[in-house]
Image (cartoon, rainbow, N blue to C red):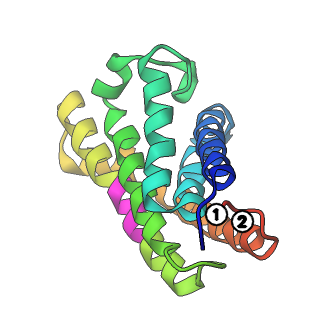
Amino acid sequence: MTRTPLAALHRLVWTALMAALIAAGAFLHFPLWGVPFSLQIYFTFLAGLALGPLWGVGAVGLYILAGLIGLPVFAGGRSGLAVLLGPTGGYIFGFLACALVMGFASRVKGPVLWTRGLIWGLVAILAVYVPGVLQLKSMLGIGWDEALTIGVAPFAPLDIIKLVLAIVTQRYMSRSRLLPT
């Protein structure tokens, strides 16, 4: 398959769209059992699945860059280097690894296979949680038990649901020929 200038433009537009959706996902949050349920990681999963590893990371990188230059794209409408270096910044950096890992799940054209998507998705969730918990623990000066209780336990079940929804979305979009080529 030959890449045309129009295909390249299509992929760039999709990359910007996924960055914007990740930012919108930070604002789309609902209190659920005392835990904020946001769609940020859902769109990060989808960026990797829809765009592949390179462009998925590009979408997350564009999102992070937007926050660094002062656009209020991080959770709570925050922005700046202080957010990235603060207690929750590790999770944001983990989004880069998440998109990369999810991109490997979609290396084959067409709908991602369920087993492949779920296995890579669980690795992607870990890729978000490891730097997130490390930075949370370091910045707050808390122990491992507390860091895992605060930074993983309330979110893991919800993130698995978001992973499943991202796979469903990618499968639908792939079958409908809506994804970039």
| Rendering quarter of residue 125 | bottom left
Quadrant occupied by the N terminus? bottom right
| Rendering quarter of residue 126 | bottom left
Please state which amino acid type lies under the numbered disc 1.
Ala
What span is in magenta?
Answer: 122-128
178 over 142 or under it: above or below: below
Number of residues whose C-alpha sits closer than 10 Å to that of mark 1, classed few (under 14), some (14–19) or many (20 or more): many
Residue sitting nearer the eye, 147 or 68: 68
Contact, mark 2 vs mark 1 (Cβ under 8 Å): yes
Q: Which residue is mark 2?
A: 169
Residue at 41 percent across and 63 percent down: it is 124
Please state which amino acid type lies under the numbered disc 2.
Thr
Q: Is there any visible trace of residue 88 in the rendered image? A: yes
Residue at 70 percent across and 74 percent down: it is 171
Residue at 60 percent across and 78 percent down: it is 109
| Rendering quarter of residue 87 | top left
Secondary structure category for the residue under label 2 = helix
Residue at 49 percent across and 53 percent down: it is 56
Q: Position of residue 74 (x, y in %)?
A: 51, 27
11 over 50 or under it: above or below: above
167 over 61 or under it: above or below: below
Number of residues whose C-alpha sits closer than 10 Å to that of mark 2, classed few (under 14), some (14–19) or many (20 or more): some
| Image-based side of 135 in relation to 123, left or right | left
Residue farthest toward the right in the current orientation of the protein: 176
Q: CA distance from mark 2 to mark 1?
A: 5 Å
Q: Main secondary structure of the magenta part?
A: helix
Residue 66 is tagged as none
Q: Position of residue 107 (x, y in %)?
A: 49, 74
Q: Residue 23: within the magenta?
A: no
Residue 166 is tagged as 1
